[in-house]
Image (tube, rainbow, N blue to C red):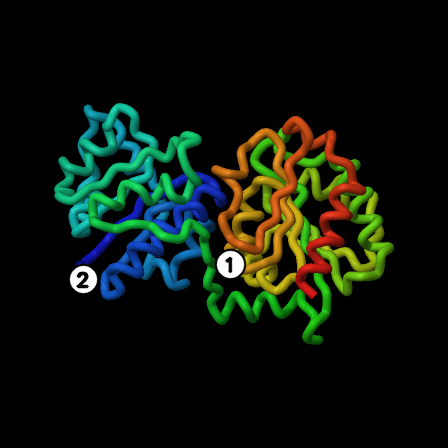
């Protein structure tokens, strides 16, 4: 298929990165095709002109709401846009098939509608790629990979030391749900200890808009020497930074998926969610499960011991 392929993907950062293996399967199978993504632009930027997609378009567009209303007249421009693709793959949650019906009404002839609601049958990336078997495509590797552009690496170099071999630790103390977070008191103790250990040239505390309250709380109680807060930087630049760190420590979160996809050595703390389904499938990811799925029961000493073990293994 050397034509035009559209992937429609909403959801959060982690949802999108878990879909990258499926999009990568399309790119690998149809290298000459024009692949486009309809999604949240700050997230789809991880794929646009970075191997996976030639272009992207924002899903935050008012007339798109009419495609979920069976009584609405479909927007002409959007109908022409959708019908201009030879293959459309939609990950929109559409239990009543209203969106699917509208796409077909708009002239989409080849449509694969995939539910983003997953179960515990297999790793999330495999479940998201499974319907592509309708196109005779089978996913072999569920590990996502991020391919930074030159501009991403340039931005990352502003934060990183030019000295080769310098040790950098990055942590993300947030996630999409409070029960998936290690308590801030534990993060504070961990970061104090790592800062005093003097084994890191730099420690980055990273986060997005939703993490600001947690980051502000930490900022007010941590020493500024050797600890840098990276907030609200574009995701591709953040991915480039994380890919050049020595170790990333985080939770079950989209930023953790980005770190793993960027190639970082990762230690990820999992609480109530199942890492067999939701953890990045990359080989350089170590999962530390909290006792009884309760992250408040995971002590700092245990996490630091695991950090020691990882650093010894990668020497």
Q: Which mark is residue 201?
A: none
Placement of 164 over or under 204, stated as above or below: below
Q: Position of residue 207 (x, y in %)?
A: 63, 47
Quadrant in the picture for residue 250: top right
Name the side, left or right, on which 306 lies relative to 22.
right
Provide the secondary structure element on which disc 2 rests.
loop
Q: Residue 52 or 215: which is nearer the viewer? A: 52
Outermost residue on the right side: it is 196
Quarter in which the C terminus is drawn: bottom right
Name the side, left or right, on which 267 lies relative to 63.
right
CB contact under 8 Å: marks 2 and 1 = no
Q: Residue 86 or 139: which is nearer the viewer? A: 139
Let me know if residue 170 appears in the view: yes
Quadrant in the picture for residue 293: top right
Residue at 17% x, 58% y: name it.
1
Residue at 36% x, 59% y: name it.
52
Q: Which residue is mark 2?
A: 2
Residue at 80% x, 42% y: name it.
301
Provide the secondary structure element on which disc 1 rests.
helix
Q: Local crowd at mark 1 within 10 Å, few (<14), some, or many (≥20)?
A: many
Q: Which residue is mark 1?
A: 236
């Amino acid at each position: 298929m050397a034509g035009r392929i559209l992937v429609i993907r909403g959801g959060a950062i982690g949802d999108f990165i878990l879909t990258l293996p499926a999009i990568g399967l399309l790119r690998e199978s149809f290298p000459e095709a024009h692949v486009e993504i309809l999604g949240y632009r700050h997230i789809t930027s991880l794929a646009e002109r970075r191997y996976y997609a030639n272009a992207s378009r924002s899903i935050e567009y008012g007339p798109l709401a009419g495609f979920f209303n069976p009584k609405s007249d479909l927007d002409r421009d959007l109908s022409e846009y959708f019908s201009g693709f030879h293959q459309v793959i939609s990950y929109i949650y559409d239990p009543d098939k209203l969106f699917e019906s509208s796409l077909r009404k708009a002239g989409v002839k080849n449509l694969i509608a995939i539910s983003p609601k997953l179960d515990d049958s297999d790793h999330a990336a495999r479940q998201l790629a499974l319907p592509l078997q309708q196109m005779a495509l089978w996913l072999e590797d569920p590990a996502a990979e991020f391919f930074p552009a030159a501009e991403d690496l340039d931005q990352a170099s502003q934060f990183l030391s030019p000295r080769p071999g310098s040790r950098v630790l990055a942590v993300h103390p947030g996630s999409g749900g409070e029960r998936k977070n290690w308590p801030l008191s534990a993060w504070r103790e961990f970061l104090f200890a790592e800062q005093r250990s003097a084994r890191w040239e730099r420690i980055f505390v990273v986060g997005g808009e939703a993490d600001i309250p947690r980051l502000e709380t930490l900022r007010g109680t941590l020493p500024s020497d050797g600890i840098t807060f990276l907030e609200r930087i574009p995701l591709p630049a953040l991915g480039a930074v994380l890919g050049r760190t020595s170790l990333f420590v985080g939770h079950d979160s989209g930023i953790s998926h980005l770190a793993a996809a960027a190639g970082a050595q990762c230690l990820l703390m999992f609480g109530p969610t199942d890492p067999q389904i939701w953890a990045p499938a990359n080989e350089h990811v170590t999962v530390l499960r909290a006792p009884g799925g309760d992250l408040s029961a995971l002590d700092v000493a245990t996490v630091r011991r695991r950090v020691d073990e990882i650093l010894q293994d990668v020497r």
